[in-house]
Amino acid sequence: MPDNVLKAAETGRSFQDHYTAADVGLSGARPFRVCNTHWDETGDDTWPGDDPEAPSYPSRFLEMFAKDIPPGRPVPIHSHDFHEFVFVRRTRGNIHVTPETREPLRRGDVIIMLPRAKHGFEPMAGLMKTDLFLQPQWLSDELRLLWREGGLIQALLAASLFELPSRESLWMLHLEENEMRACELELEAMRDEARAEHPSLALFSGCFLKLLSILNRRFRASGATVEAAFSREVWAVAEAVEEVVRKGDPLDVDRLARQVALSRRQLDRVFRAGTGSSVGAYYRSRRIQHAARMLTEPRLSIQEVAHHLNYADTAHFVRSFKAKMGLTPGNYRTHARNGEPPAHPATQDAKIDNPLRTC
């Protein structure tokens, strides 16, 4: 049996201990997934009020949760390579577990996890929750505007931009009833929109930022703190790199160093210490992330994407994109448009996308 497969306690069924964005059906074009899950004593996983004709759990990840975990059994501890927000809407003696803690759950609890955080639940009977799965790369564009609000936003942004989580990677908040109801309205709006033939990313973005503002306000009111994974100087460099990528300019590290009043050697040392990456590697990574988002726009040809992002030629762009994403730009665009799984799984760093569907 592969090392990344566990036996769920007392179920006799296989359970992976790590899940990728592809496992839950996330997409570069559709970076959200909102899933309502409910287990009762009979093993019924339907959500009250759901359309019985609609497929509730189309992805392999959720099929396993619904079919392979009997309601009286635990969900073993596992991790993901995406962000997850769990909104607890009803409980009956359920417990959230991590390698270090066991926390009883109640309505209004929200569990927030960065990539690689580990958690599980026990038992499943009576638990009603809504899961919000998010592509980390998408957050880097949306959260930059909220950086100065601090708190959870800085931790999420650090993990999204640099794949370098803060020292903490999991938090549990408790919302007041009015806050929880406000979140439920936004979650259901996102879920309803995802059922549309052409879901609006603008609507998803607006709903998510409302959710995040509520959560961040509660986080700060609780007195909790988070140490951002990068300093003011690193953030200034990240902003400058972002501007270079958006304009399609070549990277000039000496100019960046002058902008932040550091020597080139100091800049490289500070940036690498804060992010685990050189400025050049970060620029190349952000350029590919921008390319992935641009490829979801049908009006742009692959040649136009390559030209806008200042690649020497289309062939160079195709090679660079495939090395990072595991697919050629053309194949990536096809999968994002048609909702097909990747023909060839990418490496761990590739972050391959598959389209979002509601649960």
Image (cartoon, helix red, strand yellow):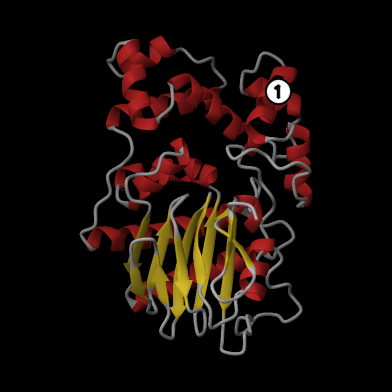
Is 213 on the left or on the right of 301, as rendered? left
Residue 298 appearing in the image: no
Q: In the shown orientation, is residue 119 left or right of residue 204?
A: left
Location of residue 25 with respect to 156 vertically, above or below:
below
Which residue is located at x 50 percent, y 85 percent? 126
Nearer to us in this view, 248 or 54: 54
- Residue drawn at x 36%, y 25% is 271
Judged from the image, the secondary structure of the residue bearing numbered disc 1 is: helix
| For residue 76, side relative to residue 227 (left or right) | right
Q: Residue furthest left?
A: 223
Q: Residue at x 55, y 49 (%)?
A: 135
User: What x and y, as percent, mark residue 347?
Assistant: 64, 38
Q: Specify the amino acid type for callout 1.
A: Arg
Residue 154, relative to residue 11: is it above or below? above
Question: Which quarter of the rendering shows the C terminus?
Answer: bottom right
Horizontal and vertical percent position of residue 327: 72, 35
Q: Which residue is mark 1?
A: 319
In this rendering, the count of numbered labels is: 1
In this rendered view, identify the residue nearer to me: 350 or 182: 350
Circle 1 packing at 10 Å, graded few (<14), some (14-19), many (20+), is: some
Name the residue: 72% across, 25% down: 318
149 or 264: nearer the viewer: 264
The outermost residue toward the front is 1
In the image, farthest residue toward the bottom? 42
Dividing the picture into quadrants, the one containing residue 113 is: bottom left
Residue 29 visible in the current orientation: yes
- Residue 319 coordinates in the image, percent (x, y): 70, 23
Looking at the image, which is closer to me, 357 or 170?
Answer: 170
Q: Quadrant of the N terminus?
A: bottom right
Above/below status of 320 relative to 251: below
Q: Is residue 139 above or below residue 323?
A: below
* Residue 100 percent location from the top left of the image: 33, 61
